[in-house]
Image (cartoon, rainbow, N blue to C red):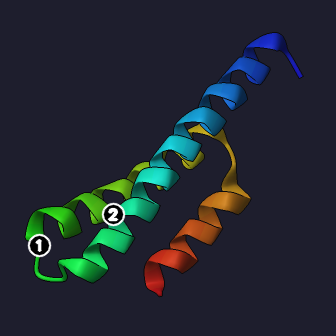
Amino acid sequence: MSVEDQEVIHEFLIESSENLARLDQEIVELERRPKDAKLLASIFRNHPYHQRHLRFSGVTTLESVTHIGESI
């Protein structure tokens, strides 16, 4: 694996960790405010972002898992 590939993976992991932490907080907050349209929209924007990023990065197995999660 090249240094460039390692950097891309490293950045992806950092971004994913931050986005998943935010998603976790938003889902907990949604339990408190189930009718908050802006919060719900933010949750749904976050998911496709991960799918696109995984597809672009060539991580197709994980991308497939996100599609299953989306169906749920």
Of all residues shown, which one is farthest toward the bottom?
72
Q: Which residue is mark 2?
A: 26
Tell me residue 40's x, y (percent). 21, 69
In the depicted structure, whether residue 2 falls above or below residue 47: above
What amino acid type is highlighted by mark number 1? Asp
Crowding at dot 1, Cα within 10 Å, few <14 / some 14-19 / many 20+, comes out as: few
SS category of the residue bearing label 1: loop
Tell me residue 51's x, y (percent). 49, 55
Nearest the eye: 28 or 11: 28
Q: Which residue is mark 1?
A: 36
Tell me residue 39's x, y (percent). 19, 64
Q: Earlier in the sequence, mark 2 or mark 1?
A: 2
Using the image, tell me which numbered label, if any, was put on residue 46: none
Nearest the eye: 63 or 26: 26
Residue at 29% across, 65% down: 44
Question: Does residue 13 appear to the left or right of 21 in the view shown?
Answer: right
Question: Does residue 15 appear to the left or right of 4 in the view shown?
Answer: left
* Cα separation between marks 2 and 1: 11 Å
Nearest the eye: 19 or 28: 28
What amino acid type is highlighted by mark number 2? Glu
Of all residues shown, which one is farthest toward the front?
32
Residue at 29% across, 57% down: 45
